[in-house]
Amino acid sequence: MHSFKLTLQILTVLSFGLALVTTKSIGQYNLLRIPDTLSGTHFNLTIKDTFAQIVNTGNQTITGGINGNFWGPTLFLKKGEVVYMNVKNNLNDSTTIHWHGMHLPAVMDGGPHQIIPPGTLWQPYWKVTNNAATYWYHPHLDMMTEEQITKGIGGLIIVRDSIESALPLPRTYGIDDIPLVLTDRDFNSSNQFVTVPYGDSMLVNGTLRPQYSIPGQVVRFRILDGAIERSYNLGFSDNRTFYVITSDGGLLNAPVGVTRYLIHAGERIEILVNCTGQAGSTVDLRAFNSTLSNFIAGGENFVNGPFGNALGKKDFNILHLNINSATNNPINTIPATLTNNILLNSSDAKITRHLTISDSAGVPGILGPNAFILNHKLFKFDFNDYEVPLGNTEIWEITSSSIFGHPFHIHDVQFNIISVNGAAPAAAQAGWKDVVFIPGKAGPNNTVVKFIAKFEDYADKIHPFMYHCHIALHEDEGMMGQFVVTGTTTQTNYSQSYLNEFSIYPNPSKNKLFISFTDPDNTVYYVKINNALGKTMYMLPRPQTENGIDIHYLSPGIYSIQLTDEKTKSITTKFFIKE
Ligand code: C2O
Ligand code: CU
Ligand code: CU
């Protein structure tokens, strides 16, 4: 059940006691942390409870990290390659890891259904088909996303492809190509994170009051709004023009020069900033949030209550930049063009789906009067809102009666925005997106946002994809729905009597376990290996069993192997002995 920790933001100016409004943003600068990198095709990610010295003085902060002690490594993927993830959950809680923006099978997606119990290894893999751009991975456990993201669990994904690689763009990571993960956090008096929608202190890559040195040339920043809730109205202290080169899921046709860019939770942009000839000077990347409306996250000016925070409706520094001399072979010009996006055509749409955003006041059966909801209901784990036929091009039209704005995100696809209240998207959003901001309604008319997407490649009647508000608080409260993509290829009826029979060999086994089916056309859909106590040790979506399942990590003993077969999706259990 979804319960309401917190309710409609507009109405919570009063009560709930005093929020701790102390900003840890005074004092000297800290060197911006740059996340480590991993590249290749096999990635080992260990999620753990840990701690980090985030506040300069006093206690370390209890955090969640992936491999390191806050946030996780940046994964470099190449379009066209198959990547294999070894995700080990060493937290004391269950979690999931979702590959935000990636196009992949639902069973590999890491949404709320792909729960990784503590101590379990989850091994999804997929062929990278996304365009070069910046993506990210993060926990997505139902009702726990806010808490687990607050701990710092997540990481960036940088996809490279041949089009982007051929362009004269900066791409030396940490030198002229710099990742910026924007979040804000609330710390209690012993320097521990408080799980609240808005923090009092700005963090970039987990760094308070960051500064960084950049060369005097064109510098690329890959910016993720990784906040629980806040939007950032980005700009520079000298109001210089910067150039947006990507929307969430790929390059724009050409750089778009702006002096402000309003980024919402879950969104990414890459920007170019021309610092040629500016060695010796400094400039700050700032959030100009004082100009935001009260109905955009971060534009409220609550001092007290659950949404009270020191940064609300304020302008504040994000990153202090010291411009140094140029590197060898610098990029000194902003390219005129980038790519040639072939966007989806409305006349190819097979259906228009009508979704609504509203607040829950007066909706029967919903506890608490004032959450935000999609389609007049809370998220239901076992209910598919839509069945999308594989290969469909669809228009999704979202009508919002909420006065508050919501960043809407959908899994599986990258889409093109068709219109926001009838107007074409701004140039910097006229490409591939996976988050679209649904502005709050102003005046009597509801907001209407339309996008178009094509649902290709992966059909699966069992595992759904999600769509939801990317404000983690709203998502956790139930502002989420799900759909399955259904394909004709999986509709055939098979007799369940013997086709799912399989055998495992050798048994006992030391290093590798092989699986064979009675029906040679059948394949493995899912494998779970549990120990004698019933604890899940491995979760293997569609394992490539021809090479055997590597079990050398398991300690000796008896295990059960639970296999779901591809054709019938029925589950059979066998036992084996690990020597
Ligand atoms: Cu970034 Cu469904 O999530
Ligand atoms: Cu996502
Ligand atoms: Cu929302």
Image (cartoon, grey):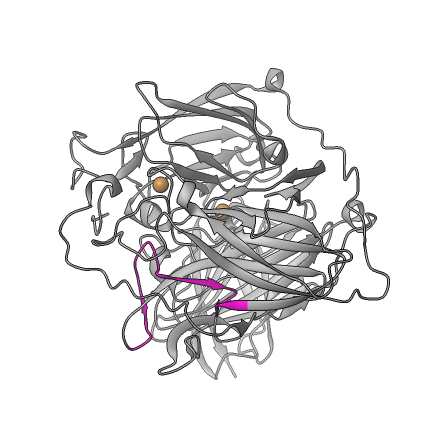
Q: Position of residue 202 (x, y in %)?
A: 43, 61
Q: Position of residue 568 (x, y in %)?
A: 48, 44
Q: Position of residue 496 (x, y in %)?
A: 46, 44
Query: In the rendered image of this protein, does residue 543 appear above or below residue 241?
Result: below
Q: Position of residue 475 (x, y in %)?
A: 35, 46
The residue sitting at 41% across, 78% down in the picture is: 51
**Residue located farthest toward the top when viewing the structure as drawn:** 347
The residue sitting at 80% across, 66% down in the picture is: 327
Q: From the viewer's perspective, is 212 left or right of 166?
A: left
First to last magenta residue range: 190-210
Query: In the rendered image of this protein, does residue 86 appear above or below residue 315?
Result: below
**Quarter occupied by residue 347:** top right
Q: Is residue 302 found inside the magenta-colored segment of the image?
A: no
The residue sitting at 30% across, 58% down in the picture is: 196
**Relative to the observer, which residue lies in front, 197 or 130?**
197
Q: From the viewer's perspective, is 32 left or right of 323?
A: left
Q: Is residue 191 found inside the magenta-colored segment of the image?
A: yes
**Quarter occupied by residue 183:** bottom left
Q: From the viewer's perspective, is 119 left or right of 75?
A: left
The residue sitting at 72% across, 32% down in the picture is: 341
